[in-house]
Image (cartoon, rainbow, N blue to C red):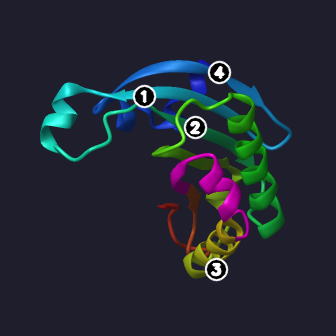
Amino acid sequence: FPSQVYHLDLNRIASNFRVRNLGSRHTSTCLVHMYEASPKVTALAKDKRANKNPRVFARALSFVLDFSSSSFEHLLVDALNAMDVVNLKSKADNHLFVNLVGESENIVLDPVVVEQITVDILKRHSERIAGLGISEVETRIVCCLARDSPPIALR
């Protein structure tokens, strides 16, 4: 999947971490790439209180045709299942990045509705997220705010 690698936003990780590929899992809703990341000395020098231990960055990439509560929840569960299978050594500061790409660029979405759906589903799965040591879940979707507006990225 080399042509899709830019969707993983790995440059955001590589600036502060040494990254080791843990493999990927293909599910019915997404492709989940997992990386073990150890903080670079330069990053630790900037923040003396930062966690020095390795953590896992999971990057779930989904080519969705629509955005709905059920489709987002199914994707989240698939990503969490993939993280379960990897047998995480780190139980703190792990990250999950969900990037919804594809036809969504042409979909008109209300950012408030997207945020509410995302928050509700994350709350519903909060115990499992905490159990996997995930400290941050980030979602990105490109959509339009109106039929005549250009696509924008919601995070």
Count residues near mark 4 (Cα–Cα under 10 Å), then give few for <14, some for 14-19, many for 20+: few
**Pointer 2: what residue?**
58
Q: Nearer the viewer, mark 4 or mark 2?
A: 2
Q: Position of 62 compared to 151: left or right?
A: right
Q: Which label belongs to residue 1?
A: 4
Count residues near mark 1 (Cα–Cα under 10 Å), then give few for <14, some for 14-19, many for 20+: many
Q: Quadrant of residue 141?
A: bottom right
Q: Amino acid at mark 1?
A: Ala
Q: Nearer the viewer, mark 4 or mark 1?
A: 1
Residue at the image point whose x is 73% and y is 69% from the top? 124
**Pointer 1: what residue?**
37
Residue 41 rendering spot, x and y as whole percentages = 20, 26
Mark 1–mark 3 Cα distance, whole angstroms, equals 33 Å
Q: Earlier in the sequence, mark 4 or mark 3?
A: 4
Instruction: Assess whether mark 3 and mark 4 are in contact (beta carbons under 8 angstroms).
Output: no
Instruction: Assess whether mark 2 and mark 4 are in contact (beta carbons under 8 angstroms).
Output: no
Count residues near mark 2 (Cα–Cα under 10 Å), then give few for <14, some for 14-19, many for 20+: many
Mark 4–mark 1 Cα distance, whole angstroms, equals 21 Å
**Pointer 3: what residue?**
113
Mark 4–mark 2 Cα distance, whole angstroms, equals 16 Å
Mark 3–mark 2 Cα distance, whole angstroms, equals 25 Å
Task: Decide whether residue 137 is among the magenta residues.
Answer: yes
Decide: is 114 above or below 79: below
Q: Earlier in the sequence, mark 3 or mark 2?
A: 2
Q: Amino acid at mark 3?
A: Val
Residue at the image point whose x is 74% and y is 63% from the top? 67
Image quadrant where one finds the N terminus: top right
Q: Nearer the viewer, mark 1 or mark 3?
A: 1
Residue 16 rendering spot, x and y as whole percentages = 28, 33
Residue at the image point whose x is 77% and y is 67% from the top? 68
Report the span colored magenta. 124-139
